[in-house]
Amino acid sequence: MDRAAIIGVGMTKIEKSKVRDTFADMAWEAVNKALADAGMTIDDIDNVVTTSSDFWDGRTISCMAVGDASGAAHKNVTCVEGDGTYGAFYGMTRSLSGSYKTTLVTGHSKGSQSISSLITNSAFDPIYERSLGMDMVTACAMQARSYMHRTKTTPEQMALVSVKNHGNAMKNPLAQLPMNITVNDVLKSEMIADPLHKLDCSPVSDGCAAVIIAHESVATKFKQKPVWIKGVSFCADSFFFGDRDLSRVKSLTEAAKKAYAMAGIKDPKKEIDVAEIYDAFSYQELMWLEEMGLADDATAGKLLEKGDFNIEGRLPVNASGGLLSGHPVIAAGLYSMAAVVKQIRGDAGGFQVKKAKTGLVQGLNGLGGQSHCVWILDQEK
Amino acid sequence: MAEKEHIIIESGDAIQPFAYTVGMYGSKFFAELRDNGRIMAVRCPKCKKVYIPPRKVCGECFVEMNDWVEVGPKGVIGTFTILRFAFIDPETGAQKPVPYGYGFIKFDGADTLFQHYISVEDEKKIKIGARVEPVFSKNPTGSMRDIEYFKVID
Ligand SMILES: [Zn+2]
């Protein structure tokens, strides 16, 4: 199979409210940063994929409003609704299609402009679920409870994820919430929905991220060191939350297995050097690690306590600060991808990990992770 | 220096009316709930899984389901949360009184979980695996609110 690489990344700072910027203004900033990072001009971009959600943007066909600022004029531009990792998947297939050599992928959202719980409530079934008030926090609190019940993960272990990631964010100038906090601070923060405290939850955020994905024939033509896509897969589970075993994530396990197989990875615990995963809530980091086979079942909390997932640890997880430190929905997965790209290039600055040859990125779609997208990125082709 | 005012355009009271059909499966479910206080589910002819809420297609098997079965009304708590922060009620736009319980209920005879409120009168009793039963509305209209909430029974 032909190969593709990520040859440029650009992100706005993640902020609570970018009141000075429209969606297009954010796209302009992220796109120009990605072009500069790659050493490209907009003329070097063959086609564009934007990623957005109509409900979050408060408009129909939200992708059309950011086309101009994303350099899509006179080009084939298309849209993915979902996490940015899914936009990137589509972008990669376009770069591999033979029709295009370079694809610019963007993802944006502004949580600040709406009431998050009403937006996430709208994702649920309008007949059976929505009217009772189900939203993302409620759903994830129930998933957290199921996971804790099965694995005996403790509130203290969950809180430690938040402590680690907010601490890591102090080394990332793009993060929204760098904080030096303790487990006790998390446990004493307001209980939102049992067992989730306020500091177990990611904040409401604004931001836009862009990545440029190139076919191997042009991947080394520009200034930037290419980061190679070695494996990628996404899998979906059933729509109704109640159909799933909420203490497990079958679709993530399958997606990870397929991505490892494609990348030729036999022992992910040993072969993955660095990971950025979708920690919208503290427990999710532990749950996703286990479901991807990066920790044995029901052990992630204990490994976290041992320091395994710290920047200096065996497998640094969310060294950038993760989504607990800034969660622009939709753009989120592209921020994670850009963070791993920077690690592999050795450009991560204050949150650079020691060894970063092979990295893992995980994005998700749907509340509580109905569908998961797993990427294996590598320094070597 | 005086703080600058941000100029923001708000959506105001604009609404987007939308009529969601409940379909033939939903019609049967809500009519049985309203008229007879019965909880109806459908069974997959292939994998035999009993689905609630009822729907036409078993996604696992990609086959149509027409085999109706009554489940519950008693069951157990599959998982739950207790909301302590006032979320906005999407039906009324008002802040909901807290705390309130929200859970996934596994009706006796069903294989999937059904979400609803759980009474939090005695929080200590709310546990995964606790037995519950629905408290039905006195004025059923054919909606999810025909069940007011579930309560733990010993
Ligand atoms: Zn079936």
Image (cartoon, rainbow, N blue to C red):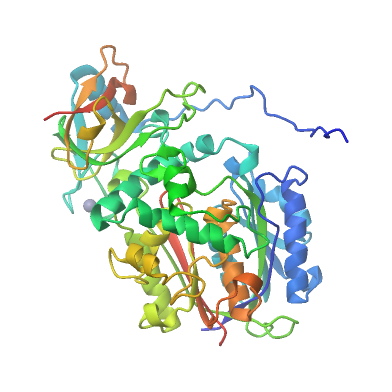
* Image position, residue A286 (x, y; %): 38, 61
Q: Residue at x 30, y 66 (%)?
A: A299
Left or right, A91 with respect to A143, comes to: right
For this orientation, the residue located farthest to the bottom is A380
Quadrant assignment, res A17: top right
Q: A246 or A327: nearer the eye? A: A327
How many labels were placed on the picture? 0
Q: B27 or A71: nearer the eye? A: A71
For this orientation, the residue located farthest to the right is B1
Q: Residue at x 13, y 40 (%)?
A: B109
Q: Residue at x 28, y 16 (%)?
A: B140
* Image position, residue A277 (x, y; %): 48, 63
Look at the image and tell me in which quarter the C terminus of chain A lies.
bottom right
Is A217 located above or below residue A245 in the figure?
below
* Image position, residue A244 (x, y; %): 29, 50
Is A378 located above or below residue B129 in the figure?
below
Residue A35 in view = yes
Is A123 located above or below residue A174 in the figure?
above
For this orientation, the residue located farthest to the top is B139
* Image position, residue B84 (x, y; %): 41, 32
Residue A124 in view = no
Q: B41 or B110: nearer the eye? A: B110
